[in-house]
Image: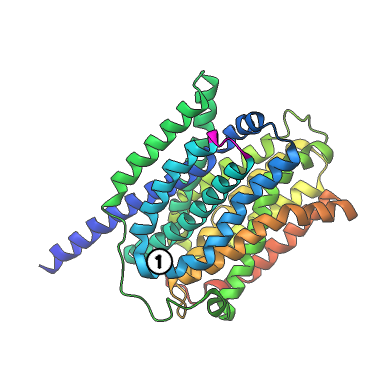
């Protein structure tokens, strides 16, 4: 009988893992499908780059506005309810953003789009932490890998559909259909409302009052800042500092993103084999080496190799930090993830501006070199970060 119960539990956990992968995939899909449509919206509204920049900031503002309340919402409604609400809103807001006829309308739509993304980000990571914990093995890197695949599928798929001659509305409706199908497939195996953990209704400030969680949140700030730099500044760096043609400078981020996606898919096996601490040290060291190559050797090919190494190193650091935060011994997982994600997003938002400030007063190479120091500090902090993390079952 015990064997049957154990087998049933394992089968249930496998179905929960599959559902969680679908949700991570659709989150990446829904978020990135918007990117190829931005020029169409810009042209239809007849706005300039400055206005577009302010409008796009609404996405980040919406995410950050909702995150302080996500922990309490998770405690009250559970992962399944919030994820279903987010998927439903994605299906409504994506087509609306295409055909909002005035700037206030698109601003409101982008705020909602950002809020949905922030709410879904915390909710799906909370689900992932619980599913990973129940499995007894590391699973977080693989979940995040499916987000990366979804991002590639969203941006690449919509771009291909537009190239093939589909109208923007037709392309986004196909994305909406896929989101709806994935949600229906995952729905039955998402986690419902649980008995609230002690302290689950407390605020973010109480969560961040825990020094160990605050430390993880600050590390997420800097890691997200580096990831934002890769997105916003890699092409500029390759063109201005390494002399690459503008038409080729985007290959740096492309190689970086591919390395992140592929390494996340295989990251769980490595974490299970060597443990969180060693994986964190190895990842930080690899990222530091990649960034060092980028800034120290004036050869485009070496810089491209550096972006690959940086992607390999960074790929599994955020999943490990999220997993560690979600298993914090004194803070409920939903509240811990809300706090860490909020601080991480602030790094993603402020990072490009901070790097631009350093580049203005020193150089872009100096800004990237600061990343080497950050990664060395992350590696040196590995024992403090993962010291209380439960060992994975092999």
Q: How many marks?
A: 1
| Residue under pointer 1 | 74
Nearest the camera: 53 or 24? 53
Residue 374 shows in the view: yes
Estimate the x, y position of residue 241 in percent, counting from the top left: 83, 41
> Horizontal placement of 53 versus 76: left or right?
right
Q: Mark 1 packing: few (<14 Cα in 10 Å), some, or many (20+)?
A: many
Quarter holding the C terminus is bottom left
Segment tinted magenta in the rendering: 98-102
Q: Residue at x 47, y 73 (%)?
A: 389
Q: Is residue 360 above or below residue 252?
A: below
Dividing the picture into quadrants, the one containing residue 104 is top right
Dividing the picture into quadrants, the one containing residue 100 is top right
From this viewpoint, which residue is outermost toward the left?
Answer: 1
Quarter holding the N terminus is bottom left
> Horizontal placement of 220 versus 198: left or right?
right
Estimate the x, y position of residue 128 in percent, counting from the top left: 40, 59
Nearest the camera: 251 or 94? 94
Dividing the picture into quadrants, the one containing residue 308 is top right
Circle 1 — which element?
helix
Residue 278 shows in the view: no
In magenta segment, residue 99: yes
Q: Residue at x 56, y 80 (%)?
A: 210
Estimate the x, y position of residue 361 in percent, counting from the top left: 90, 55
> Horizontal placement of 80 versus 89: left or right?
left
> Horizontal placement of 263 versus 198: left or right?
right
Task: Name the main secondary structure of what is drawn in magenta.
Answer: loop
Nearest the camera: 247 or 347? 347
Q: Is residue 137 above or below residue 261?
A: below
From this viewpoint, which residue is outermost toward the top?
Answer: 165
Q: Residue at x 31, y 66 (%)?
A: 193
In magenta segment, residue 126: no
């Amino acid at each position: 009988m015990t064997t049957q119960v154990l087998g049933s539990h394992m089968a249930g956990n496998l179905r929960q893992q599959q559902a969680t992968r679908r949700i991570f995939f659709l989150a990446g899909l829904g978020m990135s499908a918007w990117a190829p449509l931005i020029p169409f919206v810009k042209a239809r509204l007849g706005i300039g780059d400055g206005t577009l920049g302010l409008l796009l900031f609404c996405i980040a503002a919406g995410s950050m506005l909702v995150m302080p309340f996500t922990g309490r919402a998770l405690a009250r409604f559970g992962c399944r309810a919030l994820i279903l609400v987010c998927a439903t809103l994605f299906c409504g807001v994506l087509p609306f953003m295409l055909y909002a006829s005035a700037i206030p309308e698109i601003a409101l739509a982008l705020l909602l789009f950002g809020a949905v993304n922030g709410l879904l980000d915390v909710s799906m990571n909370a689900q992932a932490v619980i599913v990973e914990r129940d499995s007894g093995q590391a699973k977080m890197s693989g979940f995040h890998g499916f987000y990366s695949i979804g991002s590639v599928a969203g941006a690449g798929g919509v771009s291909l559909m537009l190239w093939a001659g589909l109208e923007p509305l037709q392309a986004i409706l196909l994305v909406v259909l896929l989101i709806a199908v994935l949600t229906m497939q995952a729905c039955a195996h998402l986690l419902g409302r649980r008995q609230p953990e002690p302290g689950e209704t407390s605020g973010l400030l109480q969560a961040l009052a825990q020094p160990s969680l605050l430390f993880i949140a600050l590390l997420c700030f800097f890691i997200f800042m580096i990831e934002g730099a890769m997105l916003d500044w890699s092409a500029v760096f390759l063109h201005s500092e390494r002399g690459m043609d503008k038409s080729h400078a985007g290959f740096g981020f492309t190689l970086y993103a591919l390395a992140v996606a592929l390494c996340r898919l295989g990251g769980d096996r490595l974490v299970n084999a060597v443990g969180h601490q060693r994986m964190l040290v190895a990842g930080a060291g690899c990222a530091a080496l990649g960034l060092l190559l980028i800034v120290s050797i004036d050869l485009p090919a070496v810089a491209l190799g550096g972006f690959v190494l940086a992607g390999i190193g960074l790929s599994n650091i955020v999943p490990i930090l999220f997993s560690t935060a979600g298993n914090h011994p004194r803070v409920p997982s939903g509240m811990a993830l809300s706090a860490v994600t909020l601080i991480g997003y602030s790094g993603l938002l402020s990072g490009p501006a901070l790097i631009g400030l350093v580049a203005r007063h020193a150089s872009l190479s100096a800004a990237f070199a600061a990343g080497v120091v950050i990664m060395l500090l992350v590696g040196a902090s590995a024992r403090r970060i993962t010291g209380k993390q439960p060992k994975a079952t092999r």
